[in-house]
Image: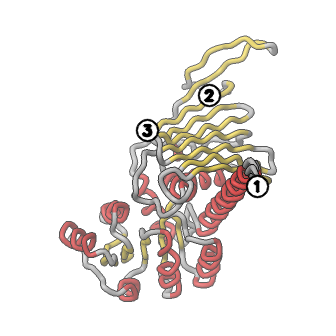
Amino acid sequence: MLKVGVFGVGHLGKFHINNWKEIPEVSLVGFFDPNNENAKEVEKTYGLKRFKSEEALIANCDIIDIVTPTQHHFPVCEMAIKMGKHVFVEKPMAHTIEEGKAIVNMVKEANVKLQVGHVERFNPAYTALKNASLNPLFIEVHRLAQFNPRGTEVSVIFDLMIHDIDIILSIVKSDIKNISASGVAVLTDTPDIANVRIEFNNGCVANLTSSRISMKKMRKIRLFQKDAYIGIDFLEKNTEIIKLKQPEDTDAFSFDIETAQGTKTISIANPVIENGNAIKAELSSFVQSILHNETPVVSEIDGFLAMEVAHQILDKIGKANSMIIQDANDNEPMPLED
């Protein structure tokens, strides 16, 4: 039985506690949270022990689950890894590139497991494609959310878009050639809306739009490849595959269309979407990677690559906005002299 300690029992931390309680291979030891209001609520609701010392909680556990604000990820990761504990840390893995690199190195030296909470990897709409051949030439992504003050300590890139960055990097097995990005801060001090174009060396192009000030919610990825269109709706948990019919597509709905090259048969398939809890699935997967000494589905390398791209995007947005401001200043009319 693996012993688990949770750092941070706010909104998402409580979801983690609920799901850890349903995983048979683990037992919850306790939690650490400096917020007295959160702590009292968790003690009362879950009967879970509150540790006043970070070191004491870590010492009593095999797995440390970090669900704190991003700026606190690194110090807790560092402490846990150096004490030989396995770590599950919410996305983004760390606040800075330097911290991310340090975590990757520490995990390797300590020979422990670390998984990053890119939960969309475990969304049933995405896992339904585990046996599909994905070789996209173009990817279109929309992730829109209504404004919520929670999570605004980071930009929309790290709050929302990083989920899609991770998904895209897991699909497109190619280095990045170029990134173009624009973004606007509307309600916070960092970009709340962003549009990004990522070009890969293999020719694939991904266009991502994220907003946390939308009137509606949307979490969709569309993959366009030579032989198929694949739509993934992470919010509604629907997946659709439209492609030229193959002999094995016996159960798919199909129809003929006339083209300049002759008659083509199109098949439309909706893979079976299993009912599932993505948070429980990611935590359970991490436990299995420890028990069977396997690389976690979303390793520290995956987490670092996603945050590295996110930082590049934020840097591009900063430079683009600086140029716009400079151009505006340069084009101001000269004052008339008396």
Q: Position of residue 164 (x, y in %)?
A: 58, 50
Whether pointer 1 and pointer 2 mark residues with C-beta atoms closer than 8 Å, the reply is no
How was the colour assigned to the protein in this rendering?
secondary structure
Mark drawn on residue 273: none
Q: Residue at x 76, y 13 (%)?
A: 259
Q: Secondary structure at mark 1?
A: strand
- For marks 1 and 3, give the CA distance: 32 Å
- For marks 1 and 2, give the CA distance: 27 Å
**Where 97 sits versus 15, above or below?**
below
Mark 1 or 3: the one toward you: 3
Mark drawn on residue 176: 1
Which label's residue is closer to the chain start, 1 or 2?
A: 1
Q: Circle 3 is placed at which residue position?
A: 215
Q: Secondary structure at mark 2?
A: strand
Q: Position of residue 313 (x, y in %)?
A: 67, 57
**Where 281 sits versus 85, above or below?**
above
The amino acid sitting under disc 3 is Met
